[in-house]
Amino acid sequence: MKTYKLYILGLMLLGTLTTRAQSSIDQVLRSIETNNKSLQANTKMTDAQKLEAQTGKFLANPSVEWEQMWGNRNNPGSEYTLTVKQSLDFPTTYSNKNKLANLKANTIGFQSAAYRQQLLLNAKQTCIEIIYLRKQKSLLDERLANAETMFALYKKRFESGDANQLELNKIQLELLNAQNQSRLNKAALTAAEEQLRNLNGGKPITFDATDYPAGEELINFDQLQAAFMDADPNLKSLTGNQEIANREVKLSRSLTLPKFDVGYKRNAASHHVASNGFMVGVSIPLFENKNTIKKAKAQAEFATASLEDNRLNLKTNLQQLYQQAEALQISRADYAKVLEQQRNIELLNKALNAGQLSVIDYFTELSTIYDSHQSYLDVEKEYHSILAQLYQYKL
């Protein structure tokens, strides 16, 4: 049996994380970005929304009117009128509409990027969960193998009268617990691998990493916060909403200016010479756009307040996540140091078999070792999960 110390060193040395895990997760994320059905649908919807944003900036449709009139028996003949006209907003309106359409298209792009980033973060955390469960499986396999060995040994000792029923019952209970934990781990690992496959559009995906990504450690908080907020698509989307709202104010002002109708008109009758000419009309903005500027200003104020609120919340959330990561980093190092100094299971088994430990003391020591190692795995997983959130802006 491998000594427990070697087992601990093999799983927990902080400096030996391989680059294979990082490249493996990167490959998984690239595959999911290509195959994920939800992401594909979101891309199509984004394209449609961008086209929709461009539809309101063009001229209104021209109108054509035809009037045909006939005389009676006392006044035979007919006449007709043809009118072709085009409605025009004040010139500044078209400039504002064009800029507004571009702002909307950019903001829709940021929203799509935020959706993609969240989906890839979910995929990365699923990979972290799988690595955690594989590490846990290694520990549980060790525990189960030890429990099976000890149960077989004490069963023989019981049959030979060298052990009592209480001792055998204790070891049998440890075996049942180890078997149960192993089954639960297997079910959770299967579910996590299935979730990863679903994220990959239902297509099989290879991910066999057993170590967390190398090179992901905490950097200076100010540096991380600046990089995160500069790249965060959610903040960019809110900034875009603010710019859209401010542009809506300008558009509302231009819509309160007069509109024009220009066109061509032709009148012709059977017994008269046809007449042609141009027509020009002006609409007087008295009623239609009442309170639109006030409404646009209110929406702009809301967009500004929403941006500032979200920026403040993001800073607070980043600070909290960073503090948790710092605490977990210290705990992870402390656990690794202490576990290296723990008595290994092989020595415990020898002490128990030699009568140097009672069964109760043996299980107390054994539980402490397994519980401590499980706590280490939990801390390690939580640390890398928070790192994934802190560095999601890189996805």
Image: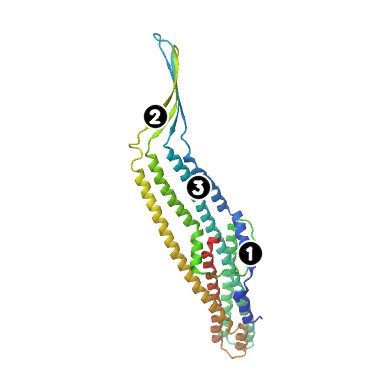
Nearer to me, 65 or 138:
65
Q: SS class of the residue under badge 2?
A: strand
Dot 2 amino acid type: Gly
Marks 2 and 1, the one that precedes in the sequence: 1
Dot 3 amino acid type: Ala
- As drawn, 192 above or below 93: below
| Residue occupied by mark 2 | 281
Q: SS class of the residue under badge 3?
A: helix
**Any part of residue 148 in sight:** no
Nearer to me, 186 or 197:
197
Task: Tell me whether circle 2 and circle 1 mark residues in contact (CB < 8 Å).
Answer: no
Marks 3 and 2, the one that precedes in the sequence: 3
- As drawn, 20 above or below 253: below
Marks 3 and 1, the one that precedes in the sequence: 1
Residue neighbourhood size for the residue with mark 1, other residues' Cα within 10 Å, grouped as few (<14), some (14–19), many (≥20): some
Q: Nearer the viewer, mark 2 or mark 1?
A: 2
| Residue occupied by mark 1 | 23
| Residue occupied by mark 3 | 105
Residue 32, numbered circle = none
Q: Nearer the viewer, mark 3 or mark 2?
A: 2
Q: CA distance from mark 2 to mark 1?
A: 68 Å
Q: CA distance from mark 3 to mark 1?
A: 34 Å
Q: Residue at x 39, y 50 (%)?
A: 300
Dot 1 amino acid type: Ser
